[in-house]
Image (cartoon, grey):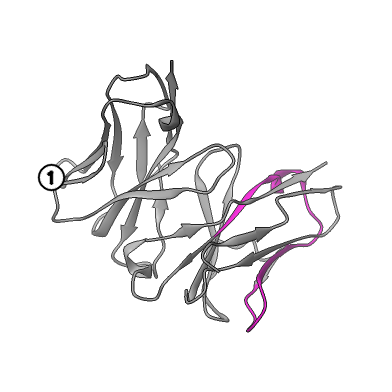
Amino acid sequence: GEEVAQTPKHLVRGEGQKAKLYCAPIKGHSYVFWYQQVLKNEFKFLISFQNENVFDETGMPKERFSAKCLPNSPCSLEIQATKLEDSAVYFCASSHYRTAGTGELFFGEGSRLTVL
Amino acid sequence: KNQVEQSPQSLIILEGKNCTLQCNYTVSPFSNLRWYKQDTGRGPVSLTIMTFSENTKSNGRYTATLDADTKQSSLHITASQLSDSASYICVVSPITGGFKTIFGAGTRLFVKA
């Protein structure tokens, strides 16, 4: 598609429940990035993919967070056993391989996760 | 200490006025610096991009400047409009780091009628 599509827009989970977020990058973009934005503050990098391969996962809290980008499927970010501090807006962004190095990111509208 | 710091945290101006937002960075070396606009409830959208060797870049009423010596960038908005109310985020791309970008905390701009 022409835009990065993220679903769901809002997700509410009880503490300890699982949360799964989805992202369809712009068609033709081979890089996908996940960011966490807490309380409208800074964007915290989580993980990036080059096609279906993990490119950089240095930001991922590996104990409970996992992500995948499988062929012909939306990318996903899954949080097992959510905690209150996971409440945030999770943004997905995609880049074309030619401009990924320039920091040109096309963002989705975000998925707001609320953990109660 | 954050490698990209923005000031002010928030700013209120009257419609039609100009304003300047600041970004100080310590990221070095970097390949480029971008300013993004994030409307409430939306994802950020790129406004300007400058490489380390550029001094200024304009996009309509938005003009970004870069001083590599002082490691400062500014975003100047002229003749502000109500629709300029948003967060403005300075983002720096280090040369090394696998396409990782470093975000400032943003300046929240409110334009009042």
Instruction: Characterize the local packing of mark 1: few (<14), some (14-19) or many (20 or more) Cα atoms within 10 angstroms.
Output: few
**Where, by quadrant of the figure, is residue B42 drawn?**
top right
Q: Amino acid at mark 1?
A: Asp
Up-down relation of residue B25 to residue A82 (above or below): above
Q: Residue at x 29, y 33 (%)?
A: B22
In this orientation, which residue lies closer to the viewer: B54 or B113? B113
Q: Which residue is mark 1?
A: B69
Q: Residue at x 16, y 40 (%)?
A: B70
Query: Where the C terminus of chain B falls, by quadrant?
Result: top left
Left or right of B42? Residue A66 is right
In this orientation, which residue lies closer to the viewer: B91 or B17? B17
Q: Is residue A77 magenta?
A: yes
Left or right of A86? Residue B67 is left
Q: Residue at x 70, y 49 (%)?
A: A86
| Number of numbered discs visible in the structure rendering | 1
**Where, by quadrant of the figure, is residue A6 drawn?**
bottom right
In this orientation, which residue lies closer to the viewer: B70 or B110? B110
The residue stretch that appears in magenta: A68-92
Residue A57 position, x and y percent, is 54, 69
Label 1 SS: loop
Left or right of A90? Residue A97 is left
Up-down relation of residue A57 to residue A18 (above or below): below
Residue A25 position, x and y percent, is 55, 68
> Residue under mark 1: which chain is it in?
B
Query: Where the N terminus of chain B falls, by quadrant?
Result: top left
Residue B84 position, x and y percent, is 41, 31
Q: Residue at x 38, y 69 (%)?
A: A100
Q: Is residue B92 magenta?
A: no
